[in-house]
Image: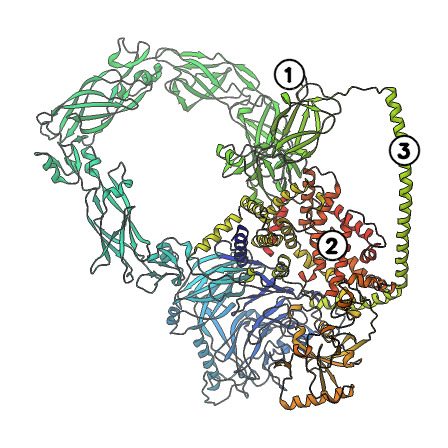
Amino acid sequence: MDVCTRCRHALQLYAVLQLLTWSAVPAAHIYQLYEGESELKHMTVDKTTGNIYLGGVNRIYQLDEDLSVIYKVQTGPHNDSVYCPMVGSCINGAERLPTDDHNKILVINYAAGELVVCGSIYQGRCERHHLSDITKRVLPPNEQTTVQPVAANNATATTVAFIAPGVPDPGMINVLYVATSLTPGLYRHRVPSLASRSLQAGKMFDLASKGISKSSSVVILDEYRDVFHVEYKAGFHFEGFSYFVQVQPRSLEREHLEQGHITKISRICDHDENYDSYTEIELQCIGKDGTVYSLAQAAILAETGRHLAESFGNKKDVLATLFVNSRLVNGREQVDSALCLFAMKDVQRMFRENIQMCYNGTVSERGLGYINRFDKGCPSGSNKLIDDTFCGDVARPLLEGQAPLRTTPVLTFSDINATSIAITTTGPFTVAFTGTDEGYLKKIFIKSATNAFEFEKVPVDPGFAILPDMHFDKQHAYLYVMSTSKVSKVKVQECDLYETCEDCSIGARDPYCGWCTLESRCSTRGRCSNANSTDRWISAEAKMCVQFSQIIPSNIPVGNANKVELRVNRLPLPSPGYGYSCVFGTAAPVPAKTLRNIPGLLCDTPPMEELSMFAGDGDHFSVPLYVRSMETGVDFVSHMFTFYNCSVHEACMPCMQSRWSCSWCMYSNRCTNDPNQCAADNPGELLVSRASQCARFIQPEGQHYETLLPSGQPQAISMLSTNLPQPRLGDTGYQCLVHVDGEAEPQVTSARILRQPDSENQTILCSETAYTYRENVQEISATLTVVWNDRHRVDSTMVTLYKCSELGRDCSRCLTRANKYQCSWCGGACSFSSACRDKPRNFCPEPRISDFSPKTGPIEGGTLVTVWGSNLLIHPSDIINGTSIAGMHCTVQEQDYDISTRVVCQTGYSGKERTGPITVVRRNSRRPLETTSVEQFKYLDPQIVQIVPLIGPRSGGTRLNVTGRNLNVGGVIKAYLDDLACEVERTSATSTSVVCITSAAPSTEQGVYITSRFVMTFDLAERALVREFTYTQDPNITHISPLRSFYSGGRMLTVHGTFLTSIQQPRIFSTFQQKKSAEMVCSVLNMTVMLCPSPPMPTSSRFRRETITTDTTAEIGFIMDDVLSVNNLSWFFPNVDASIVYVPNPLYKPFHEDANTKLYRGDSLIIEGENLNLASDTHDVRVTVGRQLCNVTSLAETQLVCIPSATQPAGVDENGHETTKLLPMVIVHVGSLQFDIGYLQYEVIEPYKLPEYAIGAIAAGGGFLVLVTLVVLLVYRRKSSQAEREYKRIQIQMDTLESNVRSECKQAFAELQTDMTDITKDLVATGIPFLDHKSYVMKVFFPGVVDHPILRRPVMRDSKRSNFDSAMIQFEQLLNNRTFLLVLINTLENQRTFSIRDKVNVASLLMIAFINKMDYATEILKSLLRMLIARSVDKKHPQLMLRRTESVVEKMLTNWMSLCMYTYLREYAGRPMFMLFKAIKHQVEKGPVDYVTSDARYTLSEDRLLLEKTDHTVLTVYLVQGDSSEYMQVRVLDCDTVSQAKCKILDALYKNTPFSIRPSLHEVDLEWRHGRGGHLVLCDEDMTSEGGCGWRRINRLKHYNVTDNAVMALVPRQNQLNGRMTMNGSQNYHNFYFSATLNHLHNLGFPKSLTTPILQATDEEKGGSKVWHLVKPMDESSNGNKDKHNHNKAHISEIFLTRLLATKGTIQKFVDDFFQTVLSANKVLPITVKYLFDFLDEESVRHQICDPDVALAWKSNSLPLRFWVNFIKNPDFVFDIHKTNAVDSSLSVIAQTFMDSCSTSEHRLGKDSPSNKLLYAKDIPKYKAMVNKFYCDIRELPSVSDQQMNTHLAEISRVN
């Protein structure tokens, strides 16, 4: 098997998988979603097929199980009025106006296979549709649409209907029970509120039983119809009765209507013909707190699970009803809901008791005054016993029960309006699903009759109410939930989402879910293997999961092998032959033994080397301990198990303080888990087993010592200790180690032990040593450690080293340090007291000011001035009254100061501007000390002059530029717009300008907020400027284009939005994988448009490597002041495409000439490069030559073309700098990139003067050429005149022929118009018989293939994935790889054995595979087209590309175009195409058609023209339809064969019916009924057929002498017995029929010797004879093998051409209509056409194709010739029709005309031109003009963006 064959097979299999998975699966809960075209009302599900049926406004739908639309039918709007009858005229001036049809009833009649649909129009009429195809209405003969009202006739009135057993025979037939609310209107007064209607033929939708005074209905009395409104909520059938749940007023009286409404349940007996058994009782749902939920919202009859049934006393059937209670809470209406359950046995019992109360005299009145006007009393003295079979009392009909059926809610919902209910079971549990008016679905676990809880809430359609109709699929795995606009397929359980047993079985409380123990996953019971075994599946009722209860021991020391006992709660019982194993971390599994009498296991620990990867530096490590099932191989329970290691501890206290069983060996100085090992290794060892026995430092009780060590001063250290060991012989003594943080080596000194008298404690005394540290910091921590015997550690503690010189850098700080430091000021420095050589001083020198801030302040004061210096103060009281600024008092801030160095004071009011120094006077014990600053402080008066801008977004963030004088004075500067803060930027503030950032403004109804003044405060000063500032609405982004950029950014993007001018400097950025790019500044053009350079990709080197050669998508965001919504466009503006595609940077290459200098000869300048147009257009590139621009005219992927100036620019670069070569520099700018290309040198051509002799020679040669040219022109003119005369002669002849047949054309056209008008009317009723999408695709993709392999279902395999499945998945992944797919196609096409048929098949299979990925298919197609174009442009005739189908891409283009145009065909272009086909068919069949050769009298094709004159007569036959007395007129010809007559009769009988569902020609016989009971079956060939000389003529109607007005009938084909055709029926009937036939034949002149019936001739009887119909073909043996054309040519005469003209003129209007339709660039034309044509234009420009006819030829080849011509020739690719050869020949002529119209070349006609070209010679110029206008109009259409195209392709994928 070669590569081609294998690939084709793989593609076919892949296509099968794609066809089977055409519907996508979204995220959890909502698995499929259907959004209706109109408001939805009702839904029902076929329990057999699973199909879903929807009823909405003006439409009904048929969906499959995945919510894909199969069929849809439009039911309205229609002209109607509620004040008009169903049929007939309106009264009282009412007028029928377009009225919507609201679906009221949608029920399935399974017995008849029908869907009953009732709407609100025509007073609530009903229709029936086929259940398998709702587009087919069920309307048998003599039965019309119902003429009586059935359902409610407006949008709001309720109607409930269901099908159940009923009269007259409940055991055999079903009836339609209908309950409808009353509506006003003249024609509604007799509409029953409740009725049972017949579903039997002849009585369809009529009342099932009707008598003189009674019927099977309940009618509300006229006097109560306006006040007593009953709303029906649900209906169902149960055990011989039909029930309705209804809400109605509590009282009949008008004055008591305020008593409110109640809920009742009514019922009727199945056998009750007159509804005498009609009974009502009240349903009451009362909460435990006394709340009455009185109004039913929805109800359903359901079968409960075992647990719930047991709580009801083993009553399985319940009526689940949702009730609501409305009340006012804080002035707001609050609706509370309740779910109440009524056992149906209790409902039956309550009905019995109420009826019994009437019969035993407990109550005296039967009630029901609103339907019972007369006798209302109960029978007196009756002892009749009422049971469940009681079916009413004719004498005492109708009863209103007085005793209600009361229950308490199983669950209530506060402030929630529940609208729908559905109930199902899983195992023994009962689950309810309730919808709410807010669009949510609640899942409820009903545990018992009094206990239920909600366990999940699913958002289905938030904001829209869930409608009452909810249905489960066939497996009850999904629930179909409907809102007014959507149908959602909701999964009933999501067990896979729970990852632990606690979440699954205990936390979720989902009755569907349980923990599958040995598989360690949450699943339904059915998906857990062996779930019925003990503890194999833990349900939602469990209180405990499988878990370890105890592990003995819980930890063990490292290196000790041990056995571990695992006690496990709920340990499942393993299957026979299987057990468990223990797994410690990554160690090998260890088989486990089962414990006796205890649920648990016994395991051995693994070797430590298998766990080495877990060991760390600590004293223990933990590994997961799993129990693994040997049956499933799954670890189903785990716990952390610890191994500890005491030896890591190097001191006694850590060893003793560890949580493990460790002991300390004092003399061995080690920690061990085995205390016996200490003594064994070291006799006389001192063993420490408690922390209190460790040697350590201690603190005296109630005391805390801080060890302070002055740096560089000798100090002894003493530490109180206990339990110090006595060194043994050979041991070294004690040492002190002081280790300063950050230093490598400790400072070591010796220590000695001092015993404490009367105490077991000792004192460690470290020798006096000077400890130092190098850093210049005030103090530093150090660690003091005491050791003995070199390495035996006693204990450690922290000590502090300090330097007085750092603690007191000046006198004031030194003297104020704590006494514990013992620092003194001596010798002009701060030193340790004992180290002072001079006497320490207790006072400090004069203060000094070094700086202050701020330097200015307002004249109003209030400025906090901070003064820095030295020795300024020790306490604020030192300078409290001694500080002034510029001569004005300054108030010292006592809480804000630093000793000596800083003081803060607040300026006072100065009254005017002034300048002066700061003075500080410090009080001293001897005299005041004063200091003055060098710099001056200024009191200034700030002024505001202007603010800009005066507009900004409502979210704030606008930078206000404030100008004025002295604007930066003071310490605290604030700004406000009215009372809205504006944050001042102090860092950029100057004396004349300040910037502040506006804050957000409150929202207003107008969207605009205006402030009146701008205020600034400078400390205590305030200045205001009266200016209005306008807060506009926040800017929005609506569109961004283009959305492609190169990696470095800088391409100009056009951004559309609103209120853009409110932003002063918008910036754009992009994000990729949470990395943000650099920001680029945008330029605002107006309120709605701004230009932004595309930002570069994030600068991470990893991104640069990844994106430099591949396309990458990033998200665009904007920074617009404080408007956050534009930062994340995908979140806040989901409809805006903000994804930008980054492509590799363009690379412009330098000139290849010497020294980068290019010689310019006056033509275009071409610059080479790579990736030039991936994200650039001509306007994105700027080319300079010197300082002059080079006009860019073309930009291709590898070339840029521009036109420089005519004269050479100066030898400079673009900045005017002189170049080294004195030649202009060529520079290319694109975005932020710049490329130096080289130098450009203009070629200067010197003028050359010709000699005189050369001029003379040239003149002589020119004269000779002129003479020759004149001669040639004369000859050419003569020949042209002859051709022109010949053409005119032919043209005149054609005009004469047209004139001769004008009258015939007019007559034929009038007849055709009449017939086509009838056809058009039929189309309105029946619709055009379009093929369904799948059939359409198969006919286009695989023409002529009936049973393609992809239509067959794949062979089902076992559940395990096979190699085949894996291969298919991998192959699918490869096909989704663009590079692989292109290489695959190119490889296949390069093989010689890869035929054209193979290419066509591969192309079609690929399109099938990508039918749901049209965007990907489009990208592949574009790549292949680029390759094809690149190959074609190098050929001699590039315009021939796409003319034929010789490559994969050409067939893919055909298929792609067919998919993209399908909707356009169905909704727009299909109608004129179908009308053209019908017109041709009608005109062809109007005259004789040879049954054998398909030659016709009326045709457009010369080759199919019937040349011989054939006499014929038009016959009108009357067709009998079944047993009906009605006849249908059909027009036939007496020269028609029997089969031709049958075809015409079938066409008339099944007008516009899809051909595939019509009876076949071979399934029926044509029977001629004549005389009294004479029936004759007509056949094409029988024993009476004319024949001789080896020829047999096919029987015509004339052969049987069929006369005008004959009566015909189509009968089923007779059975074939023994090779002959015989009749059905008894022998007597056969004898009678045979005798009648013989008599008739005798009358027709047949010989009486004929004694056998006229039977169809067998093959033996035919004897191999040749057949003919109208014209006997010439004998080939005598005339030779001459083709038909030559034969016909000898017989052509003007009259035959007249027929061609007659046919052409008759159907001309339909040809024009079709051409006008498909050649119109209107708004319904798919954007794919514009996209494709623009693509072809771009490619022609890229390849520098100057001939415009080439691009036009490509367009014509891609759409008109490749698509439309295909469908003109093959209308059966679009419609479900039969195309005859005679019709096909005429269609071919029209297709050829269409091709000629699209051709760019001129066709000169002559006498030898084909007649079909002459036929449309005058029309071709008109059609060409239409084609040219079509192309021009498309060129003028707006460009299609990639976003629009992707959206359109996604919609096509969804339809596919």
Q: Nearer the viewer, mark 3 or mark 1?
A: 3
Residue that mark 1 sits on: 1220
**Quadrant location of residue 1112?**
top right
- Horizontal placement of 833 versus 443: left or right? left
Q: Is residue 149 left or right of residue 741?
A: right
For marks 1 and 2 on the same chain, the one whose residue lies earlier in the sequence = 1
Mark whose residue sits in front, 2 or 3: 3
Neighbor class of circle 1 (other Cα within 10 Å; few <14, some 14-19, many 20+) is few
Q: Which residue is mark 3?
A: 1266
Residue 1572 appears in the figure: no
The earlier-in-sequence mark between 3 and 1 is: 1
| Residue with the mark numbered 2 | 1718
Residue 704 at what x, y percent from top left? 22, 29
Amino acid on which disc 2 is placed: Val
Residue 148, image quadrant: bottom right
In three-dimensional space, the C-alpha distance between marks 2 and 3, rounded to whole angstroms, equals 50 Å
Left of 1672 or right of it: where is 1119? left
The mark nearer the N terminus, 2 or 3, is: 3
Where in the figure is residue 219, as x and y percent of width and height? 61, 79
Type of the residue with mark 3: Val
On screen, residue 792 above or below 658: above
